[in-house]
Amino acid sequence: MNTTSAVVLFSLSGFNTTASFRDTIFSLTLLCYCLILLVNVALILTIILHQSLHEPMYIILCNLCINALYGTGGFYPKFIYDLLSNSHVIPYAGCLLQIYIIYSYAMIDYSILVLMAYDRYVAICRPLAYHSVMTVQRTLALVCLCWLVPLWCMLLVVGLTSALTLCGSHIDKLYCENWSIVKLSCGSTKANDIVGLIVIAFYFVHVLYIACSYVQLIKSALNSKEGRGKFMQTCVPHLMCLFNVTTALLFDLMYTRYGSSSVPQSLRNFMAVQFLIFPPILNPVIYGLILTKIRRTLIHLCAAAYREFKLRSTV
């Protein structure tokens, strides 16, 4: 039995509604991508270049920003190119690569947020044991797991998708999406469905862990003024980021599987890409504004850069 697809190119019909507003969307998209690059690179360099920020929480945050660059790099360059082009197609191999990057980005994001929840749980509920439990070496090992497990999961998912025989090449989105390709299959997709459910269940367990850890965090925070202070400063931004990512992913997941075709294409497009717009921008901004160490370091760097600029301009 032939298990290779005869499809060479996929067409992305999500761009059909963008023709009338192409220039506006292009300008906003370019601005959005530049802003994502700016805020994430600024936070990454701030953490890397300052020894005082080489602590577990900031190492985890640094990886959250690196993942944002990784995930958006799989979407924005192709999307910007398509906005300038009259032909909205993507090669078969390029489509699978885009699926791999975007999906693994979402999984890594959630894994890192789970690690943040664990870090905050140890810091607030077991403060005396924090430095022995969350060592830099252990943090780096856990961060590696946050990357490796999703990357290996997506290798399996994409491998199963690439083995399908397809009877079409039309994707009703702005980018390649796994479920859209699975629906084009001419044969059985039971293996894809089972693996997909296992992956969803695996990340649902992540949600349960975060919920349980925050029950303990809130109980512990209410017992002391110091605990409440730690919770407000470090857990509130984490909860905001978690809500941001979860809401965006749920919108896309629920619509992809159960959405109605009667929904306007422009709304469908927005729902499909919001997890690639809001979390990469808001997460570093939220942490940069709320975490005192990062905020002070950024203000110091901006002040130093301004003084250097003034000095050069007077010479």
Image: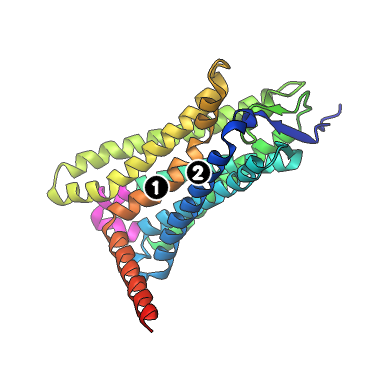
Q: Are circles 2 and 1 on residues that touch, CB within 8 Å? A: no
Residue 143 in the image, given as x and y percentages of width and height: 47, 54
Whole-percent x, y for residue 203 in the image: 48, 35
Q: Farthest residue in the right direction?
A: 1
Q: Is residue 203 above or below residue 42?
A: above
Three-letter amino acid code of the residue under disc 1: Asn
- The C terminus: image quadrant: bottom left
Quadrant containing the N terminus is: top right
Residue at x-position 61% and y-position 48%: 77
Q: Disc 2 on helix, strand or loop?
A: helix
Q: Which residues are magenta?
A: 120-133
Tell me if residue 211 can be seen: yes
Colouring of the image: rainbow
User: Of 129 and 251, which appears nearest the observer?
Assistant: 251
Question: For residue 129: magenta?
Answer: yes
Could you say where residue 34 lies in the image, as x and y percent from the top left? 50, 53
Front one among 3 and 43: 43
- How many angstroms separate mark 2 from mark 1 (CA)? 19 Å
> Which image quadrant is residue 138 in?
bottom left
Q: Nearer the viewer, residue 215 or 170?
A: 170
Q: Residue at x 45, y 55 (%)?
A: 40
Please name the residue that numbered disc 2 is placed on: 28
At label 2, counting other C-alpha atoms closer than 10 Å, the crowd grade (few under 14, some 14-19, many 20 or more) is: few
In the rendered structure, which amino acid carries the disc numbered 2? Leu
Earlier in the chain: of badge 2 and badge 1, it is 2
Label 1 sits on residue:
283
Left or right, 227 with reference to 260: left
Q: Is residue 287 magenta?
A: no
Res 53 → quadrant: bottom left
